[in-house]
């Protein structure tokens, strides 16, 4: 095995990966050899060559962005009576799909809490402003509540990575899957890609027996589903629509009926949920049409002058910021898998620590490496029909990304509390702005649920009146 691997590395100029093989014990050496064996070095070589041409490719994307127009297949937030009737019809349709058991949910949870100084999967981060519940728990309880309302169980397909899989599975097991039936919580792993030195193309080592690797992006979902066999599980369950979301946004309305209903009524392969950008250069991908096809253009590929364009009303022309929330038709995903569709890799120059030739870990002062990942939104141009639906940013989008400032834990918690206070106020409960409030998803998924549980309002009002540290409205 060792000589076979050595010969393969020599072919691609990567012999350095075995520099310290004789310092490793047998399990560590076996793990290193297995990691090396999984690497497609020919593909890495092609991607490294593409990275050299990245400026030209980026310019091509920017030229493409200049042909962009706002998406034609767009549903805005309801304003008129007719709009509200259309949204009610979508809500009824989505509710019927849920009741019929035609909906599954996909949670993307391959990222770690590195930017939060949290040495665990990001989904384990305690974000509940009063309860301290994790991202995983808040999202899983939403799904559980949605299923209870529909009288069904909604299967949860959770995509992990090498870095998060074991801890995530253990976390769900320790917490009894947060009330979900363990048979309806299915884990599958996305792939990984090594980081390569930006000058030489050599794969970086994180340690003497460890390649420097990271998840291959949420676009790795296609190959991960194919290898896991979970598409067959979805088919056998009769699932038609897949609600897709990422673990960092606790305001996401998991499997909300309106979004599901619009997707079904418009017969879309893919639906994209968007929110209004606050600033022209906000770091969000934008939904646009290019040459008649809906797609997401990364903010870095949108030229400044294009991003700054305004419409006749003075509004940002390219305002539709992607929330990374989608609905996919299962048959569309199945078709892509059957056709062995390979989504393109995106190349990013990053600052990556590595083991130098002396065996010392080096943290470079500047960006020194290329990372490669796939994005799931690259399926949009492959869809027969795509739909874009606007969400209310204040109530549905504030992802946890940073340690401080915008999208930080305090910022996200403020959004959650403001949302829950608004639900109480709509239901007739007087609550001050300085009272910390958190509503358990199992108690209410919206203000309509609170209003329907009038017998509980006296208890809530009493708790609010005597609260100093906050109220957790629980089931």
Image (spheres, rainbow, N blue to C red):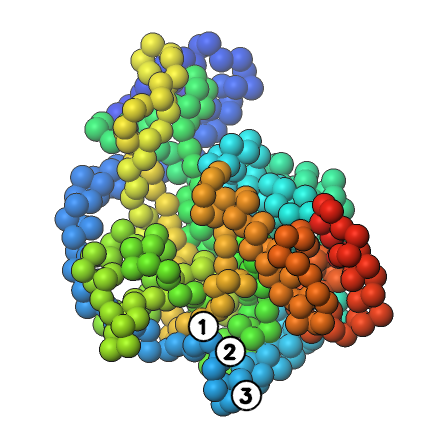
Quadrant of the image occupied by residue 427: bottom right
Numbered circle sitting on residue 262: 2
SS assignment at label 1: strand
Q: CA gap, disc 2 to disc 3? A: 12 Å
Residue topped by disc 1: 389
Q: Disc 2 or 1, which lies upstream in sequence?
A: 2
Measure the C-alpha gap from mark 1 to mark 3: 16 Å
Q: Is residue 411 above or below residue 3?
A: below
Residue 53 image position (x, y, % from top left): 17, 43
Residue at figure coordinates x 29%, y 67% from the top left: 316
SS under mark 3: helix
Count of numbered circles on the image = 3
Which residue is more in the foreground, 336 or 286? 286
Which is nearer the eye, 454 or 27? 454
Question: Quick one: label 1, few (<14), some, or many (20+) residues within 10 Å?
Answer: many
* Residue that badge 3 annotates: 85
Quadrant for the C terminus, please. Answer: bottom right
Q: Which one is in front in this view, the residue at disc 2 or the one at disc 1? A: 1
Task: Give the quadrant of residue 234.
Answer: bottom right
Circle 3 packing at 10 Å, graded few (<14), some (14-19), many (20+), is few
**Label 2 secondary element:** helix
1 vs 3, front mark: 3
For the residues bearing labels 2 and 1, Cβ distance under 8 angstroms: yes
> Sequence order check: which comes first, mark 2 or mark 3?
3
Q: Earlier in the sequence, mark 1 or mark 3?
A: 3
Q: How far is disc 2 from disc 1 in space, using C-alphas?
A: 8 Å
Task: Point out residue 420 in the picture as x, y percentages from the top left corner.
Answer: 64, 61
Whole-percent x and y of residue 168? 62, 41
On the image, the x and y values in percent for residue 461 come to: 78, 62
Of 34 and 58, nearer the camera is: 58
């Amino acid at each position: 095995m060792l000589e076979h691997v050595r010969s393969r590395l020599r072919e691609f100029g990567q012999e350095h990966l075995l520099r310290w093989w004789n310092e490793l014990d047998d399990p560590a050496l076996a793990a290193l050899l297995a990691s090396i064996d999984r690497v497609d070095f020919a593909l890495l070589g092609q991607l490294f060559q593409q990275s050299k041409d990245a400026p030209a490719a980026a310019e091509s994307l920017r030229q493409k962005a200049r042909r962009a127009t706002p998406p034609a297949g767009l549903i805005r937030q309801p304003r008129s009576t007719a709009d509200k009737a259309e949204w009610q019809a979508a809500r009824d349709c989505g509710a019927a799909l849920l009741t019929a058991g035609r909906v599954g949910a996909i949670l993307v949870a391959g990222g770690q809490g590195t930017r939060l100084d949290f040495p665990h999967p990001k989904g384990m981060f305690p974000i509940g402003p009063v309860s301290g519940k994790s991202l995983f728990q808040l999202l899983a309880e939403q799904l559980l509540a949605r299923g209870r309302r529909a009288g069904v169980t909604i299967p949860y397909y959770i995509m992990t990575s090498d870095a998060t899989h074991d801890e995530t599975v253990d976390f769900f097991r320790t917490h009894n899957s947060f009330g979900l039936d363990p048979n309806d919580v299915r884990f599958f792993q996305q792939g990984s890609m090594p980081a390569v030195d930006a000058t030489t193309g050599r794969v970086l080592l994180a340690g003497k027996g460890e390649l420097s690797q990271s998840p291959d992006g949420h676009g790795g979902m296609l190959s991960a589903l194919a290898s896991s066999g979970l598409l067959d599980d979805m088919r056998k369950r009769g699932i038609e629509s897949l609600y897709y979301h990422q673990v960092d946004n606790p305001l996401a309305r998991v499997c909300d009926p309106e979004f599901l209903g619009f997707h079904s009524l418009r017969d879309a392969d893919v639906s994209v949920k968007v929110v209004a950008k606050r600033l022209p250069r906000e770091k969000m991908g934008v939904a646009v049409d290019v040459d008649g096809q809906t797609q997401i253009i990364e903010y870095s590929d949108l030229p400044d002058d294009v991003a700054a364009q305004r419409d006749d009303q003075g509004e940002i022309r390219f305002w539709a910021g992607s929330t990374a929330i989608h609905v996919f038709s299962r048959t569309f995903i199945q078709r892509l898998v059957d056709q062995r569709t390979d989504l393109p890799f995106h190349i990013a120059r990053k600052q990556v620590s590595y083991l130098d030739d002396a065996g010392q870990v080096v943290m470079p002062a500047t960006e020194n490496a290329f990372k490669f990942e796939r994005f799931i939104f690259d399926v949009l141009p492959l869809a027969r029909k795509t739909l874009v639906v606007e969400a209310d940013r204040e109530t549905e989008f504030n992802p946890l990304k940073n340690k401080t400032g915008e999208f930080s834990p305090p910022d996200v918690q403020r959004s959650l509390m403001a949302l829950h206070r608004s639900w109480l106020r709509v239901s007739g409960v007087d609550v001050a702005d300085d009272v910390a409030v958190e509503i358990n998803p199992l108690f209410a998924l919206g203000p309509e649920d609170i209003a329907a549980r009038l017998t509980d309002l006296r208890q809530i009002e009493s708790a609010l009146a005597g609260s100093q540290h906050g109220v957790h409205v629980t089931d």
